[in-house]
Amino acid sequence: MSNLVLVTGAAGGQQGATGRLITTHLLKQGIPVRAFVRKVDARADELHAEGADVFVGDLLNPASVHEAMKDIWRAYFTYPVADGLMEAATIFAAMARSHKLELVVNNSQFQDTPEDAFFRDLLGAPTRRNLQHRLTDRVFDWAEVGAVHIQAPPYYENVRALVSRTVSEKDTVFLPWGGGDATFPLAGGEDVARVAATLLASTSLPSQKVYPLVSEALTVHEIVETLSKVLGRPLKYVPISDEQWADAVKDRINAHAVDHLSHLWRYFRTREHQSHPTDVIREVTGTNPQTLEEFFRANIKFFNPAN
């Protein structure tokens, strides 16, 4: 039986880059990887140099996904925060079933709705994107491809992208996160990738269907204080409106992502209950999850003024 693993999102991006990290983890273990990318560029060349079988394709094209699935044993599915998730996931699930994959690790989203309350609370999804993830989770389940769902909250990398510019220029965080006491669940993209790679590389199938990953649950004030501590200089948090934030980011974030994040921030700052860290990362990988402080220290260059 082939042990070739298909990894989508393998070229990576600026926020999380789980597909890129998973590819590296698997190749270092001697597990062959078919790296699914959208175009040939320097990143694809790097994947090839590392030993990956680079496949250039389109997740919204059934013929492309069918070709990528040939001789595949297991797969990792992820899709950018952009239009097309439902279509891509359905195509991927259908092709995985046709090719008889034994495991699909699906990069889903944080869900604090109990599993048995899924249908009752379907309309209560905090954002349209989150609703799409809840639905695509079920599509993968119904396809009977051994799907498991990694349900991760916003990444540390998302926080970095949101605040690095104004912190480096003005020592200030401008976000629509309320007065500062709202709690935000977070996890590092590296840890999400390590969990996925561990599941894909295991000689046995996963013991559960859902892996909720929350490394830390921090208030806005705690997040800002942690970054201030790492940088060794005082930072201010200035709450802004959803409209102000959307207007500020519209030129660098697509409309789908702006809509998703605007609703997500509103959900986190107004909900009555709080999230709590889970022990899943340590249980699956055998190592403790990265803390936000450790992430900030490893990425300090993003928050310092340009020379």
Image: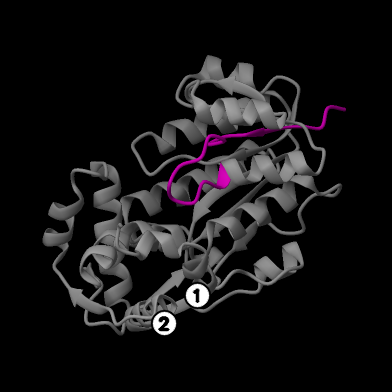
Q: Residues within 10 Å of mark 2 (few under 14, many from 20)?
A: some
**Quadrant position of residue 52:** top right
Magenta-colored span: 1-19
Query: Going 45% across and 42% down the picture, which residue do you hit?
Result: 13
The residue beneath circle 1 is 293
As drawn, the label of residue 229 is 2
Q: Secondary structure at mark 2?
A: helix
Kindly indicate whether the residue at mark 1 contacts the one at mark 2 (C-beta within 8 angstroms): yes
Give the answer, above or below, for where 193 lies relative to 23.
below
Query: Going 51% across and 27% down the picture, which residue do you hit?
Result: 42
Query: Going 30% across and 68% down the picture, which residue do you hit?
Result: 267
Q: Position of residue 215 (x, y in %)?
A: 55, 71
Q: Secondary structure at mark 1?
A: helix
Report how many numbered discs are placed on residues in the image.
2
Q: Position of residue 239 (x, y in %)?
A: 18, 74
Q: Position of residue 199 (x, y in %)?
A: 73, 51
Amino acid type of the residue that numbered disc 2 sits on in the rendered structure: Lys
From the image, state whether disc 2 or disc 1 is nearer to you: 2
Q: Position of residue 258 (x, y in %)?
A: 25, 50
Give the answer, above or below, for where 286 lies relative to 84.
below
Viewer-proximal residue, 263 or 14? Answer: 14
Direction from residue 81 to residue 284 in the image, left or right: right
